[in-house]
């Protein structure tokens, strides 16, 4: 078995002929699986011809992505069969290698120790620190292929896969299980954060009600407490108040203009539902500040700080519950 010659041949073929939209299943992935297979085989005391079988299977396990995307395991076996005879692999050895390759098809079904090693090597990244990078590349690849439509769908599929997957070999269990659990918690946290920020994807009347109440309350806090007494809030609202006091520009216009960059940021970093809701929220706040007459409640500094902060805080909470922000700086948070 001339493994090194076969490796050089196939790597040249993968580097020159793989489709460019294979962001995950590319030559880098094959190299990583091959390295992981060698590492796990050494830990599991595999050597000699058995090690060459595992390494060859790792080399060819995704090779048929050169031609097909779905059902590539069987096609990879066909390619391995057509190529390996030229590198002094016998028919029996090729059948052994094909059995290992087919075991990696999801859901994985390893029937012997060598197959368990290869299966663990193929999904080695699930328990590594670079999991997020690999998962992102796989998401982009599947999105380009039309297999995954939305990021939320992908995140939910990741969670289920990480929850269901278990490594087969003792070495992989010891080295990777804790990392896989940590990655699972990270993905779950990401999904929960997205839900807490964006709420529902659709714009419900309950969201509009919360936005209107929140905006009216924010304007009340500003015009009845903070602005008449030269108190400043934090964030973009505080910057707008400072510009209003120094340059005497209308506060309603300043708040809308100052928040626009952060609304655009929300469009690209969160989603369009959040951005449109936030734009509506900020515009309504500007209208309230310009047109609604609010009486000055008190000039007592302690009462201004307590109740101004209280009503503004409630307003921020209500708008966040509606899936948007009344102050652009919350996008960064």
Image (cartoon, rainbow, N blue to C red):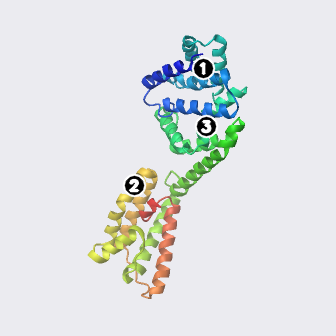
Tell me where residue 1 appears, x and y as whole percent. Answer: 60, 16
Residue 227 can be seen in this image: yes
Which percent across, then down, holds residue 246?
28, 77
Quadrant of the rendered image containing residue 224 = bottom left
The residue indicated by pointer 3 is 124
Question: Separation of disc 1 and disc 2 at Cα?
Answer: 45 Å
User: Residue 320 at what x, y percent from top left?
Assistant: 50, 62
Residue beneath the point at 54% across and 14% down: 83
At horizontal 60% and vertical 41% (from top left) the residue drawn is 126
Marked residue nearer the N-terminal end (3 or 1): 1
Of badges 3 and 1, nearer the viewer stands 3
Residue extending farthest front: 48
Instruction: Identify which residue, 301 or 140, lies in the foreground.
Output: 140
Depth order, front residue of 267/333: 333
Name the foreground residue: 175 vs 234. Answer: 175
Q: Is residue 250 above or below residue 193?
A: below
Q: Which residue is mark 1?
A: 74
The local secondary structure at tag 2 comes to: helix
Q: Quadrant of residue 242?
A: bottom left
Q: Secondary structure at mark 1?
A: helix
Q: Which residue is mark 2?
A: 265
Residue at (62, 42) in percent of width and height: 127
Which one is closest to the eye, mark 1 or mark 2?
1
């Amino acid at each position: 078995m001339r493994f090194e010659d076969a490796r050089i041949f196939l790597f040249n073929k993968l580097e020159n002929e793989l489709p460019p939209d294979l962001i995950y299943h590319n030559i880098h992935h094959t190299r990583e699986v091959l390295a992981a297979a060698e590492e796990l085989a050494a830990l599991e005391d595999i050597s000699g011809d058995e090690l060459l079988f595992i390494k060859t299977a790792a080399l060819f396990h995704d090779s048929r992505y050169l031609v097909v995307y779905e059902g590539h395991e069987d096609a990879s076996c066909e390619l391995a069969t057509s190529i390996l005879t030229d590198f002094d692999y016998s028919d029996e050895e090729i059948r052994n290698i094909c059995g290992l390759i087919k075991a990696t098809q999801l859901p994985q079904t390893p029937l012997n120790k060598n197959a368990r090693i290869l299966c663990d090597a193929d999904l080695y990244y699930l328990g590594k620190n670079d999991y997020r990078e690999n998962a992102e590349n796989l998401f982009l690849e599947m999105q380009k292929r039309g297999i995954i439509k939305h990021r939320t769908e992908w995140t939910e599929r990741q969670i289920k896969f990480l929850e269901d997957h278990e490594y087969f070999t003792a070495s992989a269990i010891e080295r990777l299980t804790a990392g896989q659990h940590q990655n699972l918690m990270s993905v779950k946290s990401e999904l929960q954060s997205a839900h807490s920020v964006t709420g529902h994807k659709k714009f419900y009347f309950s969201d509009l009600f919360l936005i209107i109440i929140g905006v009216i309350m924010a304007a009340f806090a500003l015009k009845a407490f903070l602005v008449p007494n030269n108190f400043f809030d934090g964030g973009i609202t505080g910057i707008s108040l400072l510009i209003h006091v120094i340059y005497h520009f209308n506060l309603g216009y300043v708040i809308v203009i100052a928040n626009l960059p952060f609304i655009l940021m929300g469009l690209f970093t969160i989603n369009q539902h959040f951005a449109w809701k936030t734009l509506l929220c900020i515009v309504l706040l500007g209208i309230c500040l310009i047109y609604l007459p609010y009486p000055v409640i008190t000039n007592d500094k302690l009462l201004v700080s307590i109740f101004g902060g209280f009503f503004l805080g409630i307003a921020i909470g209500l708008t966040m519950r509606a899936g948007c922000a009344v102050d652009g700086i919350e996008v960064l948070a």
